Image (cartoon, rainbow, N blue to C red):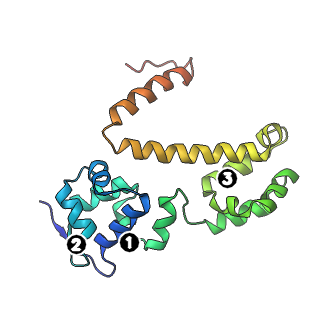
Amino acid sequence: MNAVTAVPGVDLANKIARLVEERGWNQEDFARISQLNRHTVRQILHSGPKRRLRNATVSQCADALGLTVSELRNLPLDRLLPRMHGKPPADEEALKLLYERAALPDLVSWLERNRERAAELRSDEIQELLEMQEQGGPLQKMGVENCVDLIERRRLLIGQVKEIAGTEFLELLEQLVRLMYEKVKPQNSGRSNT
């Protein structure tokens, strides 16, 4: 049974409409990506604060927006909007750790020149960057700018793959990833994937 979700406080339909607008999607785009019918999408995007959404509809909207249902329902819009641009809210503790543990002079210098970019790094990316500081490690071999650039490019690519996975191109994406994975996976895995 598909229960109806009452939306306490902030109107969920209006929040979804704002996030869809922030993505730059029109009604057709959102209907296709969320796999909802156009009538439902029109009601979500234009019905005003009284709109009540079914749980399944909320789930499809969350998936399309790259969020969990809990995030969509519970996080305030100001915390969700940065995610629409691939920028999670800054993890202050991880960022503080980065500045405290940056020992490589090139990394320290990069942090001083690039405070905004550093603030956009996710906690797992910060940990990865700190691990690259080892003697003769990637930060010394490739340079800090190149390493950060690779981390940022990977984040963007993962976001794009998530978006594609929510479309009719999922099967094509699976085929492409499978083909590429076969080229890069370790040759001596000792297992067959059949």
What amino acid is labelled 3 in the image?
Gln
Above or below, 140 against 193 in this view is below
Image location of residue 82, percent across then percent down? 52, 64
**Element type where label 2 sits in the image:** loop
What amino acid is labelled 2 in the image?
Ser
Per the rendering, the mark at residue 74 is 1
Image location of residue 166, percent across then percent down? 34, 45
Of labels 2 and 1, the one closer to you: 2
Image location of residue 80, percent across then percent down? 46, 66
Per the rendering, the mark at residue 127 is 3
Image location of residue 142, percent across then percent down? 78, 38
Q: Residue at x 35, y 71 (%)?
A: 15
In the image, 32 versus 137, the foreground residue is 32
Mark 2, residues whose alpha carbon is within 10 Å: few (<14), some, or many (≥20)?
some
Label 2, label 1: how far apart the Cα atoms are: 21 Å
In the image, 20 versus 124, the foreground residue is 20
> Quarter holding the C terminus?
top left
